[in-house]
Image (tube, helix red, strand yellow):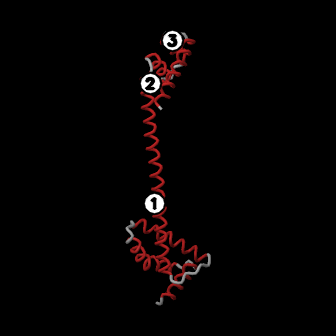
Amino acid sequence: MKEEIKSEILIRGLLNNDTKVFDYIVKKIKPSIIKHIRKKKVSKNEAEEVFQISMIKIFDVLRNNGNIEKFEPYLLKTCLNTLIDRVVERQKEEDKNEKYYKSIIEQLEEDEAFIEIIREVFSKLDKGCREIFQMKADGMNLNEIAEKLGYTERYLITKKARCKERYLKILNRMK
C-alpha cells in the first residue's frame, strides 16, 4: 500500500476511533517505533510511555485539524521529540537538585564554621558565664539558675548581661 494512502486510512481511522486501525498501529507500527526509541538507550517502559504520549499528541493535532501527510514518519518524529523533551526536563530537574544539594552543603559548612566559632568563643568565657549560658540553653529559667548557683535573681541578671557583653566582644574580635 502506498505510504500516502496508508497514512490517509490510518488518520481517518484514528479520527473515527476505528479499533482495526488502533490494532494495526499497535501490532504493526508500534514495535518498529519502540525499537527506534530503544536505540537511544531508553528502557522498554520509558519507550512505551513516550509512544503513548506521542499518540496523544497526534490525536490532539488531528482533532485540531492539523495536517499529517505521512503517519509513520510523523509518529517517529513525535516520539523522538517527546523523548528529547523528557531528557531535557530530567536534566533540568537534576541540575536543579544538584544546585539545591550544593546550597545545602554550603549552608551546612557555613553552619559548622559558625558553630565552631561559637564553641571557641564559649570556651574563652569564664566558668560562671559558661554555666549560666549552659543552664539557660538547657531550658532553666532565671529563678532556677539563680537558686542553683546561689545568686540572687537580680545579681544573676546583671552577671548574665556582663557575660553576654563579653561573649559579643570576643565574637566581634574573631570576625
Q: Residue 7: x and y, percent?
A: 51, 84
Few, some or many C-alpha atoms within 10 Å of disc 3 (few <14, some 14-19, many ≥20)?
few
Q: Nearer the viewer, mark 1 or mark 2?
A: 2
Compare marks 2 and 3 and give the one earlier in the sequence. 2
Q: Residue at position x 50%, y 86% from top?
A: 6
Question: In this rendering, would 148 be left or right of 35?
Answer: right
Mark 2 and mark 3: span between their CA atoms?
A: 23 Å
Residue 119 is drawn in which quadrant? Answer: top left
| Residue 166 or residue 19, whichever sits in front | 166
Q: Inspect the image, locate mark 1, and give the three-letter code of the amino acid beneath it.
A: Gln
- The local secondary structure at tag 2 comes to helix
- The local secondary structure at tag 3 comes to helix
Q: Nearer the viewer, mark 2 or mark 3?
A: 2
- The local secondary structure at tag 1 comes to helix
Q: Inspect the image, locate mark 3, and give the three-letter code of the amino acid beneath it.
A: Glu
**Disc 2 target residue:** 122
**Disc 1 target residue:** 91
Which residue, as the protein is rendered here, is positioned at the far front? 173
**Disc 3 target residue:** 147
Few, some or many C-alpha atoms within 10 Å of disc 1 (few <14, some 14-19, many ≥20)?
few
Mark 1 and mark 2: span between their CA atoms?
A: 46 Å
Residue 127 is drawn in which quadrant? Answer: top left
